[in-house]
Image: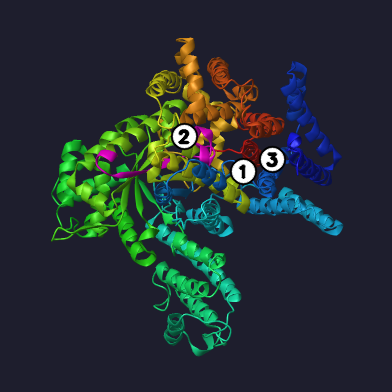
Amino acid sequence: MIDVADKNQLLRNDVKKLGNILGEILVHHGGISLLHKVETIRELTKDLRKDFSEDSYKKLKEEIASLEPPTRSQVIRAFSIYFHLVNMAEQNHRIRRRREYQLQEDGVVQPVSIESAVLSIKEGQYSDDVIQQVLNDLSIELIITAHPTEATKRTVLEIQKRISAILQALDNPMLTKKERKDLDESLFNDVTALWQTDELRQRKPTVIDEVKNGLYYFNETLFDALPSIHQELEDQLEEYFPENNWKVPNFLHFGSWIGGDRDGNPNVTPEITWETLKLQRKVALEKYDEAIVDLMKRFSQSTTRVSLDEELVKSVEQEEITYMAEDEKWPVKSEVYRRKFAIMLKRIREVGKSDMGYLAAEELEQDLVQVKNSVEKHQPSHHKLKTIRKVIRQVQLFGFHLATLDIRNHSGEHEAAITEILKVVGISDNYAQLTEEEKIKILDNVLQDPRPLLLLEEDYSKETQEVLKVFKMIKKAHAEFGPRSIEVYLVSMTQSSSDLLEVLVLAKEAGIYRLHADGKLDSALNVAPLLETIGDLVAGPEIMKTLFEMDVYRNHIQKRGNRQEIMLGYSDGSKDGGTLTANWKLFKAQQEIHNMAHNYDIALKFFHGRGGSLGRGGGPLNRSILSQPGETLGDGVKITEQGEVLSSRYLLEDIAYRNLEQAASALLEATAKVANKKLEKGQLREKAWEDAMEDISSHSLKKYQSFVFEDKDFLTYFKQATPLQELGALNIGSRPMKRKGSERFEDLRAIPWVFAWTQSRQMIPAWYAAGTGLQAFASKGQENLELLQEMYKNWPFFQSTINNLQLALMKADLTTAKEYLNLVEDQTIANRMFTNISDEYKRTHDMLLQITGNEQLLDQTPNIKESIHRRNPYVDPLNFLQVDLIQKMRSSQDESEEVLTEVLLTISGIAAGLVNTG
């Protein structure tokens, strides 16, 4: 066992080992002078952090200015590669710590695990009915998006995965001397390959490239990790409640936006979406093919040794006649299970090709269940067939569609199409100019009329026809891939009730929403608003209330199981009003919409559009879940998983499992407390806390907007004091950086907004204006500060908010950020703006320490704190180099492709070092 007093020593050993290998590679490729140059710069930045001196600062600047190609590029890459190696070492240490818990004696339970959640339920003495209801209510849906924040290429990720596997293997105490030597050699070779691989993409990825990148995680980890989480919950319930036979439903799902998100991405066409669905099905069928081949090897039972269900035997004989040519049949007649699996394989391989293939995944599931039931009748009942049960669970979870694909488009696209359609058919000359009440009246009438609205397609513009093609494609997809293939249509920039009704009208014209002449209604698509800006969040309750009071919309909701999905955008809200105000408005909107919907007996599923970075609502999954209003969790949770989050959470199976386990355990405990009304103090909040947040938020919003929207020099500072201009060349996503190619701040996407601030180490979106809000409230009296301290201890939302602010301030570094002032043409503007930022940073820092009682930021999470300290001396040189190179480019001293490449290398390296892009 590892000595608890020094539990991170093995991590340090791994980092040292990898660092030594990198050093040897640097000497080989650039000579001892390259290694000395890297070490000199690293030592100077370390000295500056320990004790800033003008002499050390001057030396560092001289060292960086003296770098010439190709040495400069090699120095940049040395620091960048180091971060990739540190990231792998830290992930391996996470896996190591989890195994340490599993090796402990009974009674030692890992925190935030499924076992700890089930144990908590056991200790809470919940009734059996409550526990089963909790299981039935559990629902987590994680949505992979193509938002362009993954700066690491797939090839590099593959190398990282191999290195991680070697690090895990080296932990095996039973390795022989030769085995250890071979592993060390392989480790050296893979680190060498990492150094010798071009980490920058040579072209922007296509949408299909992004689809394949997303599918990689299903193929590598998720297909196995999801059923493992369900099995673990079953096992722990059986362990702690052996007298019960619990039914664990399929509560954990993955979906995707990649190939379906049309908002601002002209490259996502109906044809691309169709190709996406085909690729997803291909992956699912290939995984089932592998699984059935494996089952065929395992289930070798012979009728000469064991009895089988007569019904199964008959079905095999009949199906062999129907589906199998003579040379395709399993040759041993007594091995009935293998004969059955041979038939199943044939039918899987014919899906989508001929009528011999399975028409739906449910047919494959029935065949698997038939085999399982037959085998289980002839072995001891307390021994479960986990292998075939896992495959059955996979079929239930992934079907033939693999992941439900959400379709998203901007509300303006729908309004434009409806405006044109209504004009052509003579209902309204200019629908877009009508009042909201007038729009609703027209849309209500159209939806209550069984007759179609459209004339021939030739009467409509290309743009309107493209919108209509999307809905026709959805109808076709339901027939080809099943209704689970596309279940939700998201309306971005929802600002009124008519925005959702317009989508229902378009669905009606495609036959997805259909009112029959006899009054019967079919509705096969959920329509979900995306509330993004502060104003939209405030208006959200009234928007949904208007819809819930309309018969036509209520009838649609009833057909969808009396459930409404509502997406909350963290990125644009934060960009609009600052992180603290945005998070509070999001919390409040959930609370108000939930309470309102409860009055109409409608269940709400909130879809949290979080990014990976703190400025876009990022953070650990379990903390994200617990920070929501407790009363909303029983209807399920849906969260986006974006960009670099995918590789950090789902590249390695053990890490994927641990992240999903933490999310499942958090939701399980929280849902149990809500269901049993045994809510801990703070789970449902106290009014004084909400009043405090309202006060804090108002001051924070005023401070934020006065800086971002009212200061005439803000945009100049932002564009010049960050690498915003250079980000577009990084080739990390198929989607444009700006909506409509506009230069307006409002049309700048939230991802480059956050990415640029992160690179310059100012990280404004993640913390700015929080200190002003907190201080304004605390300064009114000691009792207010004590209230904030109480909120931090007892309110998960506030605790998560404060902890994320601590993390943001730790990752920000204003000493390094000051270097970026050199990029601002007007130094008066630069110094004035930076003074504002510095003052707010100090204000926020001091308030966080007072609220938490910490001596230093993140004292409560020493592992994260140490990780940041470990990285900073290596991130700083990349920032200094980035500023130097951008100065060269912008001053036209050097506009060569080589310098641009070096700038992009620094961007990629800083992203790896901070484990954050956008």
Q: Does residue 610 show up magenta in the picture?
A: yes
What residue is disc 2 on? Answer: 627
Frontmost of labels 2 and 3 is 2
- Closer to the camera in the image, 358 or 687: 687
The answer to whether 832 is drawn above or below residue 864 in the figure is above
> Helix, strand or loop at disc 3?
helix
Position of residue 718 in the picture relative to residue 178 (left or right) = left
Q: Quadrant of residue 889?
A: top right
Position of residue 91 in the picture relative to residue 308 (left or right) = right
- Closer to the camera in the image, 503 or 304: 304
> Helix, strand or loop at disc 2?
loop
Percent of width and height locating residue 426: 13, 49
CB under 8 Å between discs 1 and 2: no
- Closer to the camera in the image, 626 or 204: 626
Identify which residue is drawn at 27% across, 42% down: 499
Percent of width and height locating residue 220: 59, 58
- Which residue is the extreme one toward the bottom? 326
CB under 8 Å between discs 3 and 1: no
What residue is disc 1 on? Answer: 110
Q: CA distance from mark 2 to mark 3?
A: 30 Å
Frontmost of labels 3 and 1 is 1
- Which residue is the extreme one toward the front? 243
Q: CA distance from mark 3 to mark 1?
A: 28 Å
Percent of width and height locating residue 77: 71, 41
What residue is disc 3 on? Answer: 83
The answer to whether 554 is drawn above or below residue 820 in the figure is below
Magenta region: which residues? 598-623
Residue 520 visible in the displayed image:
yes
Local crowd at mark 2 within 10 Å, few (<14), some, or many (≥20)?
Answer: some
Local crowd at mark 1 within 10 Å, few (<14), some, or many (≥20)?
Answer: some
